[in-house]
Image (cartoon, grey):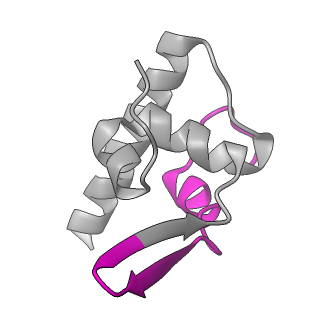
Amino acid sequence: MVLCLLVYRFAEHRLRTRLAEREQAIPKETQQANRDSYHAALVFQCFEGIELLHVHAAALSTSIVLRLQPLHLQVLVLLGAPYQHIYHIPLSG
């Protein structure tokens, strides 16, 4: 449980830092009630419903990420390259 909370805290800190650096915001539904801070659990909950489609053909195998929305792309870019790589998103400058 402690490790899980640590991961949430790290993600929240990274998101807040990157949002402040880029002077961006994400939708209100990802914020805690009565506060202007983002809660990692709510942000992660936004990722429900994303699917990974594995396509296997003769000698070629590929994976396609389905149902990525602009919010998902924004959060993944803010979190950084490792997260973009997992979701097959080109690295941003």
Q: Is residue 70 left or right of residue 41?
A: right
Q: Quadrant of residue 24?
A: top right
Q: Is residue 26 above or below residue 4?
A: above
Q: Is residue 35 left or right of residue 76?
A: right
Q: Quadrant of the N terminus?
A: bottom left
Q: Which region shows up in magenta?
A: 33-62
- The residue lying toward the viewer, choosing from 20 and 34, is 20
The image shows residue 32 at horizontal and vertical percentages of 67, 48
Q: Residue at x 35, y 57 (%)?
A: 86
Query: Furthest residue to the left?
Result: 3
Q: Quadrant of the C terminus?
A: top left
Q: Residue at x 60, y 49 (%)?
A: 72
The image shows residue 78 at horizontal and vertical percentages of 47, 32
The image shows residue 12 at horizontal and vertical percentages of 44, 42
Query: Furthest residue to the front?
Result: 58
Is residue 61 inside the magenta stretch? yes
